[in-house]
Amino acid sequence: MDKDRIDGAANQVKGATKEVVGKLTGDRKTEAEGTLQKAAGQVQSAVGKAKDDVRDAVNK
Protein backbone atom coordinates (compact mmCIF):
# COMPACT_ATOMS: atom_id res chain seq x y z
CA MET A 1 0.00 0.00 0.00
CA ASP A 2 1.34 3.39 -0.99
CA LYS A 3 2.27 5.89 1.74
CA ASP A 4 -0.01 8.50 0.14
CA ARG A 5 -3.03 6.29 0.83
CA ILE A 6 -2.15 6.05 4.51
CA ASP A 7 -1.37 9.76 4.85
CA GLY A 8 -4.52 10.63 2.91
CA ALA A 9 -6.69 8.56 5.24
CA ALA A 10 -5.08 10.25 8.25
CA ASN A 11 -5.77 13.68 6.76
CA GLN A 12 -9.39 12.72 6.12
CA VAL A 13 -9.85 11.76 9.77
CA LYS A 14 -8.11 14.91 11.04
CA GLY A 15 -10.16 17.06 8.68
CA ALA A 16 -13.43 15.44 9.68
CA THR A 17 -12.57 15.97 13.34
CA LYS A 18 -11.75 19.64 12.77
CA GLU A 19 -14.95 20.05 10.79
CA VAL A 20 -17.07 18.62 13.62
CA VAL A 21 -15.28 20.69 16.27
CA GLY A 22 -15.84 23.79 14.17
CA LYS A 23 -19.53 23.03 13.83
CA LEU A 24 -19.94 22.33 17.53
CA THR A 25 -18.12 25.48 18.61
CA GLY A 26 -19.57 27.69 15.89
CA ASP A 27 -16.06 28.41 14.58
CA ARG A 28 -16.51 28.71 10.83
CA LYS A 29 -12.78 29.03 10.20
CA THR A 30 -12.00 25.71 11.90
CA GLU A 31 -14.93 24.08 10.14
CA ALA A 32 -13.68 25.33 6.75
CA GLU A 33 -10.11 24.20 7.50
CA GLY A 34 -11.46 20.77 8.36
CA THR A 35 -13.45 20.58 5.16
CA LEU A 36 -10.39 21.51 3.11
CA GLN A 37 -8.12 19.08 4.95
CA LYS A 38 -10.65 16.29 4.47
CA ALA A 39 -10.85 17.02 0.74
CA ALA A 40 -7.05 17.13 0.46
CA GLY A 41 -6.89 13.76 2.18
CA GLN A 42 -9.35 12.31 -0.31
CA VAL A 43 -7.22 13.55 -3.21
CA GLN A 44 -4.06 12.22 -1.58
CA SER A 45 -5.70 8.82 -1.10
CA ALA A 46 -6.77 8.78 -4.74
CA VAL A 47 -3.21 9.54 -5.84
CA GLY A 48 -1.92 6.71 -3.68
CA LYS A 49 -4.49 4.32 -5.16
CA ALA A 50 -3.45 5.32 -8.67
CA LYS A 51 0.20 4.68 -7.78
CA ASP A 52 -0.73 1.26 -6.40
CA ASP A 53 -2.72 0.44 -9.55
CA VAL A 54 0.19 1.43 -11.81
CA ARG A 55 2.67 -0.53 -9.70
CA ASP A 56 0.40 -3.60 -9.82
CA ALA A 57 -0.03 -3.31 -13.60
CA VAL A 58 3.71 -3.01 -14.17
CA ASN A 59 4.51 -5.96 -11.92
CA LYS A 60 2.14 -8.38 -13.69
Image: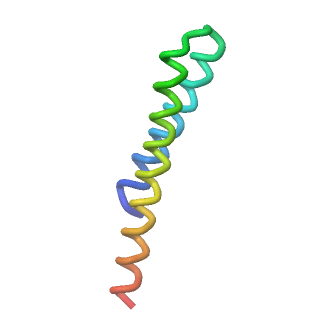
Task: Determine the residue positioned at 37% across, 61% down.
Answer: 2
As displayed, is residue 26 above or below residue 52? above
Choose between 6 and 50: the one closer to the eye. 50
Q: Quadrant of residue 59?
A: bottom left
Query: Where is the N terminus found, in terms of image quarters?
Result: bottom left
Q: Nearer the viewer, residue 35 or 20?
A: 35
Point 42% across, 68% down: residue: 50
In front here: 33 or 53? 33
Location of residue 35 in the rendering, given as x and y in whole percent from the top left corner? 53, 32
The residue positioned 46% from the left and 25% from the top of the image is 33
| Residue at 40% over, 80% down | 56
**Above or below 6: residue 52:** below
Looking at the image, which is closer to me, 36 or 55?
Answer: 36
Across and down, in percent, residue 14 comes to: 49, 31
Horizontal and vertical percent position of residue 38: 51, 38
Q: Position of residue 10 (x, y in %)?
A: 46, 41
